Amino acid sequence: MMAFVKVANKWEIKEGEPKAVEIDGKEVMLSNVGGKIFAVSDICSHKQCSLSGGFMEGFEITCPCHMARFDVRNGKVMAPPATVDIKSYPVKIEGDDILVDT
């Protein structure tokens, strides 16, 4: 059963500027690509760096520590040195509220 939790307002997540939030002890990164909001783990699977400190290009977030890249739509590794995908979370929009299910 899904338990969506409000984590932000839509206007808080600007395109190309990822934002870290904590949900039930989990570090989650929100990103806005073309007005669509995505949620993935904020922790790089390579060396546990915060991905929200990285930079966005299209649907990819680049880790600021070692340049691994991930697709924010599904958490898939797009470039090494990471070899393990990160978790992707369901997102729901209600009005201006962003809700995420972890």
Image (tube, grey):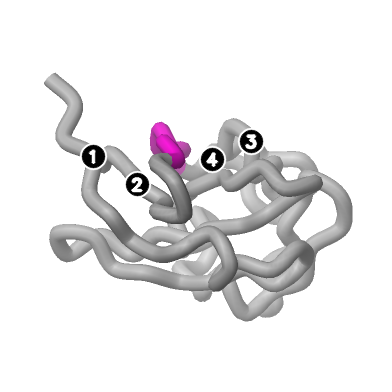
Front residue of 73 and 50: 73
Disc 2 + disc 1, Cβ < 8 Å: yes
Front residue of 19/75: it is: 19
Tag 4, which secondary structure?
A: loop
Which one is in front in this view, the residue at disc 2 or the one at disc 3? 2
Residue 79 belongs to magenta span: no
Upstream in the sequence, badge 4 or badge 1?
Answer: 1
Q: Which mark is residue 99?
A: 2
Frontmost of labels 3 and 1 is: 1
Read off the residue under disc 1.
4
The answer to which of marks 3 and 1 sits earlier in the sequence is 1
The residue drawn where x is 44% and y is 46% is: 95
Query: Image quarter for residue 93?
Result: top left
Marks 2 and 4 sit apart, C-alpha to C-alpha, by 26 Å
Name the residue rendered at 69%, 68% in the picture.
14
Find residue 84 and name its label: 4
At x 34%, y 46%, the residue is 99
Name the spot of residue 61 as percent of width and height, x first. Answer: 72, 58
Quarter of the picture containing the N terminus is top left
The boundaries of the magenta stretch are 87-93
Q: Amino acid at mark 4?
A: Val
Assess whether mark 3 and mark 2 are in contact (beta carbons under 8 angstroms): no
* Quadrant location of the C terminus in the rendered image: top left
How far apart are labels 3 and 1 at the CA level? Answer: 18 Å
